[in-house]
Image (tube, grey):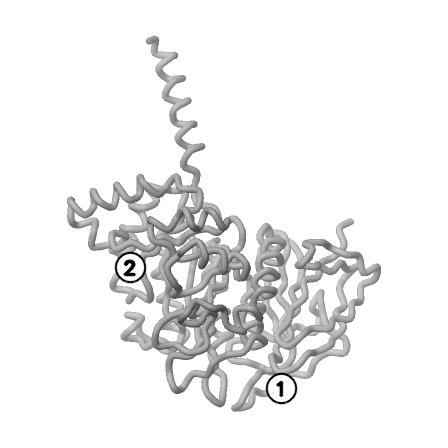
Amino acid sequence: MTRTTAVLAFLLLTAAAAVAQPNWQLGKPIVTYWAGPAMTEANAKQMAEGNFNLVWCQEQELDNAQKQGVRALLHNGLISPAVLADPAKRAELDALIDRVKNHPAMYAYFIGDEPNSARFPEIGKLFAYLREKDPAHLAYINLFPTYATNEQLGNQGDVVTAYTEHLKQFVAVVKPQLISYDHYHFGVGADGGQYFLNLGLIRDAALQAGIPFLNIIQAATWDPGMRIPHTAEVRFLVNTSLAYGAQGVSYYVYCCGGHLGMLANFDGSPTLLYYGLKHPNRDFAAMATQLQPLKALGAYHAGTKAQGAKLLPTDAPFRLDPPVANQEPVTNMPVEGFVLGYFGPQGGQPTHVVVVNLDYGKPAQTTLVGPGNLQTFNPAKCRWTNVGTSRLTLRLQAGGAALVRLAPR
C-alpha cells in the first residue's frame, strides 16, 4: 500500500466512523416523565398514545420502546461515576454501551438526580467518558430547584447568588448537552413564589451555554403540604416552560409509590390527568419544534408581577391591546395576566411569540398586536394560517397558549 493509498484509507475510515457516531442531537422536543412502570409493550403503547416520546427503560425493554416509536432513557446501575474507578465494572459499562448504542430506541443514559456541586467533577468525568464511547446519545442528570438549601447545592449566598453559581459550575465542570431541573409549584392553599425566578435563571444559563433545557413539573402530590394539580394547572406549567424557551417537559410522576394524583394508577390504568395532558403534550412538541431553530429572545409578563419575572416593555414589538395593568402578587395565587415569549433569529428581532394565559382558573381573551401581518399556528395540524392583519384576537383556555409569527415576506 502506498502512502497516498494509506492516507485515503484512513480518511475514509474516519469519515465512516463520524457517520456512524454523530454527536447527540435533541431531535423532537422531549415529552417525558419521572418514575414510571416497567416498560412493557403495553405501557409503551399507553405512553405513545399519551403523546410521550421519551420513556424510562431497562436494557431488556428497549425493543418495547422501539415497537411503539418512543425513545428510551436507559437506566442501569453501571451508569455511575463510581464505576470508572473500578476496572472490572468499567469493562462491564463498556460492554453495556456497545450493546445499546446502536439500538434504534436509544436516546439517553440516566445518571442521577440533584447532585451537590461537590460531585460535579466526578459527574463531569462520566459525561466525558460516555461522550467518548457513545457521542450519539445524551448523558442525562437532573438538578435541584431554587428552593434547595445552600447545603444541598454546595454553594453559598442568597437564593439567586447560590443558585446562579450552582448552574455556572455545573455548565463549566460537567459540560452538559442539556440542562434539566425540577420545580414543584402547587402547595396546599397557595402556589410557590419562585417558579418564574427558577425558570428565568435556568433559561439564562441554557442560553449562555448554547444548550436546550427541560423542566420537570408537578403532576402529583407526595407531601401533606403539596396539592394534586388538575389539568389546567399542569397545562400552565407546560406552556410557561414553552414561552421561556424549554425544549422539554417531564412530569413528576407517572406512577410511583408514596404519591397521589399521577398519570397512571397503580393497576396501570390511566388517570384523568393522563387524558387531560394528551393534547398539551402534542401541542408542546409541535410548537417547540417550530421554535427549535430560533433563539429565545425574551419572556415578558403583563399582569401579576411574579418574583423574578420581567415586565412587558411599553415599546414591545409584540404587545397586548388594551395593555394589561401590572399588579402586585397576592398570597393565594394564581397569577393573572399573560406571558409573551419572544423568539427570532440569532442577533435579530423577534419573529415569533408564544402567548400564555397565566390564569389556570379560567379562560382569557386578549388582542395581540404585532409589527406586521401575523400568522397563527395550529399544533394539531402543524399548519400556519394567515391572519391578514397585524392584530389578532386570542381566546386562550385556562393556562392555554398560542404560537403566532410574522407572516414571511
Disc 1, SS: loop
Using a 10 Å C-alpha cutoff, classify the residue at mark 1 as few (fewer than 14 neighbours), some (14 to 19) or many (20 or more): some
Residue type highlighted by circle 2: Phe
Residue at the (78%, 71%) spot, across then down: 393
**Residue 55 visible in the picture:** yes
Residue at the disc numbered 1: 327
Outermost residue toward the top?
2
Residue type of the residue flagged with mark 1: Gln
- State left or right for residue 89 relative to residue 22: left
> Which residue was labeled with disc 2?
120
In terms of sequence position, does the residue under pointer 1 or pointer 2 come before the other? 2
Whether residue 207 can be seen here: no
What is the quadrant of the N terminus in the image?
top left
Instruction: Check if mark 1's residue and mark 2's residue have beta carbons within 8 Å.
Output: no
In the rendered image, residue 45, in percent from the top left (x then y), is placed at: 49, 56
Helix, strand or loop at label 2? It is: helix
Write down the quadrant of residue 110 in the picture.
Answer: bottom left
273 horizontally vs 98: left or right: right
Tell me the residue at 54%/51% (across/down).
28
Q: Residue at x 39, y 48 (%)?
A: 62
Q: Residues within 10 Å of mark 2 (few under 14, many from 20)?
A: some
The residue sitting at 44% across, 53% down in the picture is: 41
Residue 396, position in %: x, y? 69, 73
Percent position (x, y) of residue 67? 47, 47
Front one among 46 and 14: 46
Q: Is residue 265 left or right of residue 273?
A: left
- What is the CA distance from the residue labelled 1 to the residue labelled 2? 40 Å
Can you tell which quarter of the image residue 371 is in? Answer: bottom right
Q: Nearer the viewer, residue 100 or 299?
A: 100
